[in-house]
Amino acid sequence: MDWGADLSGDFRFSFEYYYDHIMRPFRKYVLEALALIEPLELDIVAPAHGSVLRDHPRRYVERFRELATPYLPKEQGDDKTLLIFYLSSYGNTARMAEAVCAGAEQVTGVRVSLYDLAGGEVEPFMDLIEEADGVALGSPTINGDATKPFWDLLSSLVVIDVQGKLGAAFGSYGWSGEAVEMLENRLRGLKFKVPEPGIRVKLIPTEEELAQCRAFGTRLGRILSGQVESKVIDFEYLV
Ligand SMILES: Cc1cc2nc3c(=O)[nH]c(=O)nc-3n(C[C@H](O)[C@H](O)[C@H](O)COP(=O)(O)O)c2cc1C
């Protein structure tokens, strides 16, 4: 039997799918391996499993380099990047998010971006998170849970390398307020560092609570920029 990709129907989907779901978290090693392969004269690429690539094999090597290379060059030089995502029905968590953002922006050397997840789409954020140094997630508690776009976002992150990035959570709630802790636990499960206990605000944030959110943002920024040593919060602290 012949396993050539050139005989496997349209092989492009499988090729890209394999990168996105298997190789993407190991992007760094993909680039190292490509550096070894690229100088070689290529007649055929015979991977340990999957189709044999013999029709223009160098095209596949080039495509792997494109896939494994950050899609935008880092514009911010040595600055650290913090992405803040929020969702908000009545504007309560949105106000918190703006305050966290304003606080983080006070820190020199940290570039902060604020995103509303109301559209529900998470795919466009994957590349940004892959390149970012930290994420802060702001969700209200709805029916004892964080909101769905956050679970969609977090479950998508299993295919990128997020280990050691900074993670944080905050959100408004009405009575039980589970969302923040749930998000923190999931962030830890994905191997983010969660150095600061999240902030919960009951319903509409007061001026004092917004000041706490700003201070929270500043602490996150300072941790990212290395101005304070990050401490990892023990699980016991939260129970
Ligand atoms: C449908 C619905 C379900 C809710 N469920 C909860 C809940 O289970 N626990 C809780 O603490 N608050 C709950 N709340 C209250 C919201 O968390 C609260 O109104 C919060 O301030 C909304 O923040 P936002 O303006 O950022 O959306 C619920 C609100 C709505 C509308």
Image: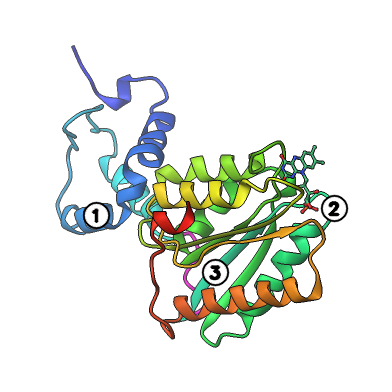
Determine the secondary structure under disc 2. loop
In the figure, residue 213 lies in which quadrant? bottom right
* Span of residues in magenta: 71-77
Q: Which label lies toward us, 2 or 3?
A: 2
Closer to the chain start, of discs 2 and 3, is 3
The residue nearer to you, when weighing 19 against 213, is: 213
Q: Residue at x 39, y 20 (%)?
A: 9
Residue type highlighted by circle 3: Leu
Q: Is residue 75 visible?
A: no
> Looking at the image, is 221 positioned above or below residue 204?
below
Q: Which residue is mark 2?
A: 90
Report the disc number at residue 29.
1
Q: Which residue is mark 3?
A: 82
Q: Residue at x 60, y 73 (%)?
A: 216
Closer to the chain start, of discs 1 and 3, is 1
- Distance in Å between CA atoms under marks 1 and 3: 25 Å
Residue type highlighted by circle 2: Tyr
- Is the residue indicated by label 1 positioned so its CB lies within 8 Å of ligand 1? no
Left or right of 56, for residue 149? right
What secondary structure characterizes most of the magenta part? loop
- Distance in Å between CA atoms under marks 2 and 1: 45 Å
Q: Which label lies toward us, 1 or 3?
A: 3
Give the percent coordinates (x, y) of residue 192: 41, 57
The residue nearer to you, when weighing 168 against 59, is: 168
Give the percent coordinates (x, y) of residue 79: 48, 80
Q: Rate crowding at label 3 as few (under 14), some (14 to 19) or many (20 or more) other CA atoms within 10 Å.
A: many
Is 74 included in the stretch rendered in magenta? yes
Closer to the chain start, of discs 2 and 1, is 1
Is 132 included in the stretch rendered in magenta? no
